[in-house]
Image (cartoon, rainbow, N blue to C red):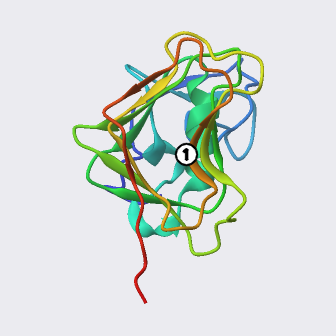
C-alpha cells in the first residue's frame, strides 16, 4: 500500500478484538493484542484490499477479499478503471446479499491472459438461493474470449442486474 492508492481511511483500535486480519478492514498489530478496525460509512472499496484497477495487475484476490469483508454490504470498484481478474469472483454466498457497484462510472472486469476458458468471471450465489438485494450496477465485462461465461447466477430469485453491459472482444486474425 502506498500514499494515494485509495486504501487509506480512518481506523480505530479495539484492544479486545480478536477478529481475523483481512488486510483491508481488520488489521492486527505486529505485536500485542487487539485489532485496528476500519470505520466504514458505506460499503467496501476494493482498493482497501490492494486492488490496482490498472488493467495489468491481477485484482481477483483483492476483489474477492472485499466481497467477503462486505458480508451484507456493497463492494465498490472505482469507475473508469479496469480490474484484471485471473480467477472467478464469487459474489454472495447464498446467505448474505452483496451488491457490486462501479462507483461514479462504469468499472471494467477483464480476464487475465491466463484465465481459464472453462471458468466464469463472476458467480452470484452458491446453489441454494440468492438473497434479495444482491446484484451488479455499472460493471462492464471484457472476457476477451477467455471465460466460459461473464456472469453466472446460480439462483435468480431477487437478483438485480442494473446497467450492466457485456463486452465480447473478437480477435480478428
- Residue count near mark 1 (Cα–Cα under 10 Å), binned few <14, some 14–19, many ≥20: many
Q: Is residue 23 visible?
A: no
Percent coordinates x, y for residue 48 in the rendering? 48, 43
Residue 169 occupies which quadrant of the picture? bottom left
Percent coordinates x, y for residue 150 in the rendering? 54, 49
Residue visible at 54% across and 47% down? 49
Q: Horizontally, is 88 left or right of 46 in the view? A: right
Q: Is 96 or 118 nearer to us in this picture?
A: 118
Percent coordinates x, y for residue 18 in the rendering? 76, 24
Above/below status of 106 relative to 74: below
Residue visible at 62% across and 43% down? 64
Above/below status of 21 relative to 108: above
Residue 65 occupies which quadrant of the picture? top right
Q: Is 8 or 15 nearer to us in this picture?
A: 8
Residue visible at 51% across and 53% down? 50
User: Which residue is disc 1 drawn over?
Assistant: 63
Q: Is residue 90 visible?
A: yes
SS at badge 1 = helix
Q: Is 108 or 129 nearer to us in this picture?
A: 129
Above/below status of 81 relative to 97: below
Amino acid at each position: 500500500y502506498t500514499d494515494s492508492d485509495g486504501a487509506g481511511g480512518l481506523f480505530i483500535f479495539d484492544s479486545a478484538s480478536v477478529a481475523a486480519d483481512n488486510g483491508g478492514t481488520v488489521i492486527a498489530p505486529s505485536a500485542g493484542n487487539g485489532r485496528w478496525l476500519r470505520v466504514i460509512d458505506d460499503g467496501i472499496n476494493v482498493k482497501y484490499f490492494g486492488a490496482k484497477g490498472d488493467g495489468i495487475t491481477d485484482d481477483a484476490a483483492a476483489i474477492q477479499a472485499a466481497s467477503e469483508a462486505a458480508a451484507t454490504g456493497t463492494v465498490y470498484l472505482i469507475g473508469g478503471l479496469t480490474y484484471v481478474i485471473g480467477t472467478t469472483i464469487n459474489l454472495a454466498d447464498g446467505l448474505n446479499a452483496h451488491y457490486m457497484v462501479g462507483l461514479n462510472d462504469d468499472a471494467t472486469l477483464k480476464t487475465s491472459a491466463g484465465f481459464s476458458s472453462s471458468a466464469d468471471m463472476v458467480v452470484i450465489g452458491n446453489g441454494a438461493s440468492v438473497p434479495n438485494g444482491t446484484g451488479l450496477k455499472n460493471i462492464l465485462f471484457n472476457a476477451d474470449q477467455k471465460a466460459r461465461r461473464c456472469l453466472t447466477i446460480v439462483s435468480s430469485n431477487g437478483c438485480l442486474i442494473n446497467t450492466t453491459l457485456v463486452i465480447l472482444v473478437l480477435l480478428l486474425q
